[in-house]
């Protein structure tokens, strides 16, 4: 896969039945492959493939390969949408626990008073409303993997209990004195800075050290831009297939804009934007799904403002367009650029900038005499 800086040199074609280059390791695909039972399944599973071959992702996958067979606790950290859950699945799928349960619990999504019972289960009558016995996630995950998502949201009162089950592999259901032994591999994830939370006294240090046996840090997408083209073509192919819309090519400007966007929502955001673009596509061409302001900004960058003169010209033009070619006055381009009105007019003349449609006139740079302060339209 070509690095992102060179994406604009090529036309991005999407060939639905072609096997694209993925991570050269191939392990993620193989691991998922074990689970394939039917075409239907394999179609859905493609979403779980780990796409990309940046060195940052390669380093993460190496760690995954190393830790997966050990049974050790793994703590996956990274911004939202970076693929923490995907990595948790991969750890389970290439461990000897594959075929055993992979149980997920999002600690942030469960009301605090129910979390304990979700984790450890309860006996009938253990508390008001406990009308039947309930098996907790630790028991359900016995011999398998428990994925505790948003582990930073575990309330302080529950943290010692979690520590105990991690250390002793034993616990009691709520309302019971009987101790249950389990064999559970824990993979935890969070987008919060647990070390900082420990410093602030919001997270127990002993639990943090117990979770942090093998930390994996997933870098944000903006730090592995080389993965963007492969991710874009992957989602175009999958989503296009799902919606019955065949996308034949991705214009270089679109790929270039996607490659330079900062992706605060990481791969999830990219996936959702591609879905929007596939819906909006016409004649098999993928449109640029980035918001207009972003697209304009990126387009400007990709036009290549390489010299100081180019940059100055671009900035002046953008400002003039933004203020509808008003030069003077408090809301005019000169004020926005921090220039005197006459200086701006001089610069525009030097750079050959004139309002579109007015170039034919001789003296295009003089502001219209429309009253004090307005100085707006170029004549
Ligand atoms: N390398 C990748 N290749 C293909 N798809 C990916 C990759 N990384 C993430 N995804 C997809 O992006 C979406 C978000 O990933 P995931 O849910 O694993 O993120 P997360 O880090 O757990 O986010 P959050 O912190 O918000 O829970 C999922 O649909 C996932 O399949
Ligand atoms: Mg997640």
Image (cartoon, helix red, strand yellow):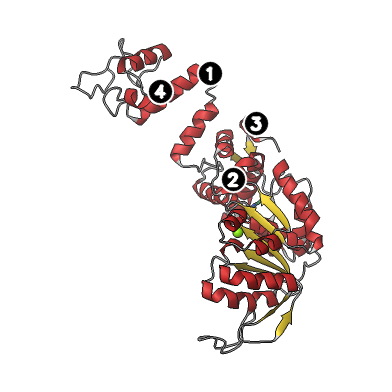
Label number found at residue 6: 3
Expressed as whole percent of the image width and height from the top left, the position of residue 359 reads: 35, 16
**Disc 2 from disc 3: Cα separation:** 22 Å
Q: Of callouts 1 and 4, which one flags the residue occurring earlier in the amino acid sequence?
A: 1
**Circles 1, 4 touching at the beta carbon (< 8 Å):** no
In front of the other: label 2 or label 3? 3
In front of the other: label 1 or label 2? 1
In front of the other: label 3 or label 1? 1
Answer with the quarter of the image where residue 68 lies: bottom right
In front: 314, or 136?
136
Ligand 1 sits in which quadrant? Answer: bottom right
Using the image, determine if residue 58 lies above or below residue 156: above
Using the image, determine if residue 276 lies above or below residue 152: above
Q: Of callouts 1 and 2, which one flags the residue occurring earlier in the amino acid sequence?
A: 2
Which residue ends up furthest to the top in the rendered image?
362
Q: Of callouts 3 and 4, which one flags the residue occurring earlier in the amino acid sequence?
A: 3
Neighbor class of circle 1 (other Cα within 10 Å; few <14, some 14-19, many 20+) is: few
Secondary structure type for disc 1? loop
Secondary structure type for disc 4? helix
Q: To which residue does mark 1 refer?
A: 307
Instruction: Residue 214: tell me if it is visible.
Output: yes
Residue 155 shown left or right of residue 39 in the figure: left
Q: Of callouts 2 and 3, which one flags the residue occurring earlier in the amino acid sequence?
A: 3
Q: To which residue does mark 4 refer?
A: 316
**Disc 1 from disc 2: Cα separation:** 36 Å
**Disc 3 from disc 4: Cα separation:** 28 Å
Q: To which residue does mark 2 refer?
A: 247
**Circles 2, 3 touching at the beta carbon (< 8 Å):** no
| The C terminus - image quarter | top left
């Amino acid at each position: 896969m070509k690095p992102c800086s060179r994406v604009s040199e090529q036309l991005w074609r999407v060939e639905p039945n072609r096997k694209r280059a993925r991570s050269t390791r191939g392990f993620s695909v193989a691991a998922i492959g074990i689970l394939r039972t039917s075409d239907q399944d394999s179609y859905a599973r493609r979403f779980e493939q780990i796409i990309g071959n940046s060195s940052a992702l390669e380093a993460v996958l190496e760690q995954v390969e190393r830790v997966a067979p050990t049974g050790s606790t793994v703590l996956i950290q990274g911004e939202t949408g970076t693929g923490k859950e995907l990595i948790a699945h991969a750890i389970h799928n290439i461990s000897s626990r594959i075929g055993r349960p992979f149980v997920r619990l999002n600690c942030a999504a469960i009301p605090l008073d129910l979390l304990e019972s979700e984790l450890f289960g309860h006996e009938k009558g253990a508390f008001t409303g406990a009308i039947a016995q309930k098996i907790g996630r630790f028991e359900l995950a016995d011999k398998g993997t428990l994925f505790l998502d948003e582990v930073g949201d575990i309330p302080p009162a529950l943290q010692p209990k979690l520590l105990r089950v991690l250390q002793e592999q034993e616990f009691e259901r709520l309302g019971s004195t009987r101790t249950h032994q389990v064999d559970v591999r824990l993979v935890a994830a969070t987008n919060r800075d647990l070390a900082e939370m420990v410093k602030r006294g919001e997270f127990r240090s002993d639990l943090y050290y117990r979770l942090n046996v093998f930390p994996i840090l997933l870098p944000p997408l903006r730090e592995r831009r080389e993965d963007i083209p492969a991710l874009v073509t992957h989602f175009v192919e999958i989503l296009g297939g799902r919606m019955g819309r065949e996308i034949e090519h991705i214009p270089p400007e679109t790929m270039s804009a996607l490659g330079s966007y900062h992706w605060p929502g990481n791969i999830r955001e990219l996936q959702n934007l591609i879905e929007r673009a596939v819906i909006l596509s016409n004649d098999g061409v993928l449109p640029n799904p980035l918001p207009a302001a972003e697209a304009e900004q990126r387009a400007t960058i990709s036009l290549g403002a390489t010299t100081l003169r180019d940059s100055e010209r671009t900035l002046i033009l953008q400002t003039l367009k933004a203020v509808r070619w008003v030069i003077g006055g408090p809301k005019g381009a000169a004020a926005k650029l921090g220039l005197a009105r006459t200086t701006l007019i001089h610069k525009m003349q030097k750079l050959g900038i004139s309002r579109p449609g007015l170039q034919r006139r001789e003296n295009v740079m003089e502001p219209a005499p429309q009253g004090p302060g307005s100085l707006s339209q170029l004549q």
